[in-house]
């Protein structure tokens, strides 16, 4: 363990007592093996999960309960900083945190997580290569494959991936041209002062600021996901100056909040989740997802078993259900990707072709998508080849949080 990681661990333990300030910021594959779960031990267990509303969905929990025979399910929606604070503050209300890869160290370093063995996951065999093979462009820890495993032999996981995507900029094409929007600098362009939005998660906001600064010639940071303390200082100055100039209409953290801002026209450009852009289009409002010249931000959400849970079998079954393919339909038709190729076996071929292969939409119009439309950014393969960086836990995490607090207070 590096010195900076040890300092992070101590700081997180110290913060766990009162870290509320951080809060500012059934498919065929599964059913074929459901007999393994439909047993008395699982029927007597419950599944209590916390995470973004992206994955903590009543529909998915209800389907999982029906397919698995688990006694009960409950889900709590919370931002990553908020959920992290609750867990590090000692909450025993949850069995699983549906977290994001870069926040794994917060629970691993503080001994709040338990590994899940791949041998316990019946549907693991069809996981995508992105989760098992390192991309030589990035250091191992600077990509998802270097974050989720407990061991080099890849026998157990700190996080079972359930959803992943490549994030970009959402914008109103009636206000911004594609050329203007296809750069992370658009969020900080004074032309859109007072109508720009920024994510309230500091691990997201800083990386975007760094990419914009690189393009503007204000910095030359090699890995926007892991800047040095000095580079964070410069990014904080940049963010604070933009805030004082009135650049940001709002800091957003919730899916519905983001959709409302974009649909109302209060925000015309911001960092965004592609499903939020799709939701705005479904309302008949103009909205597009940029193809940033600097590249996308890569991330993956997954299930982390919280230490001490009395419902281990339920957590494992829930994680395996996510890999069955069926839950992947729900999130794929919002604009995310499933980490397992099982999705292709259960999703309608024409839908899979649109969402994953970059092919034109076929059939009746649906949620703002019309015959012949293409997914913004193209196929999964095309988008995956244009990743600027993967989110990661920064070596100077404590310093970043300090600088983020300064930004919030400015």
Image: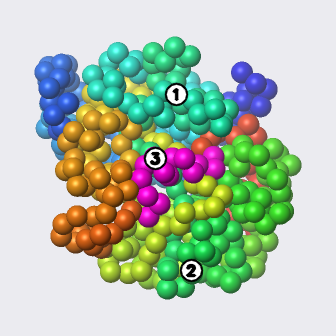
First-in-chain label (2 vs 3): 2
**Residue 364 lies in what quarter of the image?**
bottom left
Residue 386 magenta-highlighted: yes
User: What residue does disc 1 label?
Assistant: 133
Span colored in magenta: 376-389
Residue at which label 3 appears: 381
Front-most of residues 44 and 348: 348
Q: Assess whether mark 3 and mark 2 are in contact (beta carbons under 8 angstroms).
A: no
Residue drawn at (63%, 32%), measured in percent from left and top? 136
Q: Secondary structure at mark 3?
A: helix
Task: Tell me the distance, in whole angstroms, between the alpha carbons under discs 3 and 1.
Answer: 15 Å
Q: Position of residue 131 (x, y in %)?
A: 48, 31
From what the image shows, is residue 84 above or below residue 239? above
Using residue 55 as the reference point, say whether residue 222 is left or right of it: right
- Tell me, yes or no, if residue 284 can be seen here: yes
- Of labels 3 and 1, the one closer to you: 3
Is residue 380 within the magenta segment? yes
Q: Earlier in the sequence, mark 1 or mark 2?
A: 1
Give residue 207's position: percent from left, percent from top: 68, 53
């Amino acid at each position: 363990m590096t010195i900076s990681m040890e300092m992070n661990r101590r700081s997180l333990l110290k913060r766990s007592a009162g870290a509320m300030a951080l809060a500012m910021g059934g498919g065929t594959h599964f059913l074929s093996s459901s007999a393994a779960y439909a047993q008395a031990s699982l029927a007597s267990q419950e599944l209590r999960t916390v995470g973004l509303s992206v994955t903590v969905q009543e529909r998915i929990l209800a389907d999982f309960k029906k397919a698995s025979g688990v006694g009960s399910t409950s889900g709590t929606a919370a931002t990553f900083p908020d959920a992290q604070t609750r867990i590090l503050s000692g909450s025993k209300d949850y069995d699983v945190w549906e977290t994001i890869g870069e926040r794994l160290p917060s629970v691993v370093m503080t001994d709040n997580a338990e590994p899940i063995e791949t041998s316990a996951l019946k549907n693991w065999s069809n996981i995508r290569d992105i989760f098992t093979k390192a991309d030589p462009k990035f250091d191992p820890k600077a990509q998802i494959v270097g974050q989720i495993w407990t061991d080099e032999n890849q026998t157990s996981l700190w996080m079972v991936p359930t959803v992943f995507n490549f994030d970009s900029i959402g914008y109103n094409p009636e206000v911004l041209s594609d050329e203007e929007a296809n750069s992370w600098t658009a969020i900080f362009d004074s032309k859109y002062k007072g109508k720009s939005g920024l994510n309230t998660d500091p691990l997201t906001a800083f990386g975007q600021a760094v990419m914009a600064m690189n393009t503007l010639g204000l910095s030359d940071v090699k890995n926007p996901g892991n800047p040095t303390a000095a580079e964070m200082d410069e990014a904080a100055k940049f963010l604070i100056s933009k805030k004082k100039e009135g650049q940001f209409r709002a800091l957003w953290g919730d899916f519905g909040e983001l959709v409302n801002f974009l649909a109302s026209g209060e925000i015309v450009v911001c960092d965004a989740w592609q499903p939020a852009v799709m939701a705005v289009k479904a309302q008949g409002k103009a909205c597009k997802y940029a193809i940033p010249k600097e590249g996308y931000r890569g991330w993956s959400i997954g299930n982390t078993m919280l230490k001490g849970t009395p419902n281990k079998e339920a957590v494992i079954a829930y994680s395996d259900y996510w890999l069955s393919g069926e839950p992947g339909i729900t999130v794929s038709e919002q604009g995310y990707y499933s980490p397992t190729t099982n999705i292709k076996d259960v999703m309608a071929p024409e839908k899979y072709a649109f969402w994953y292969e970059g092919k034109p939409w076929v059939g009746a119009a649906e949620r703002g998508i019309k015959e012949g439309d293409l997914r913004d950014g193209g196929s999964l393969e095309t988008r995956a080849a244009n990743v600027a960086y993967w989110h990661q836990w920064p070596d100077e995490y404590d310093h970043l949080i300090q600088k983020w607090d300064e930004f919030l207070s400015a």
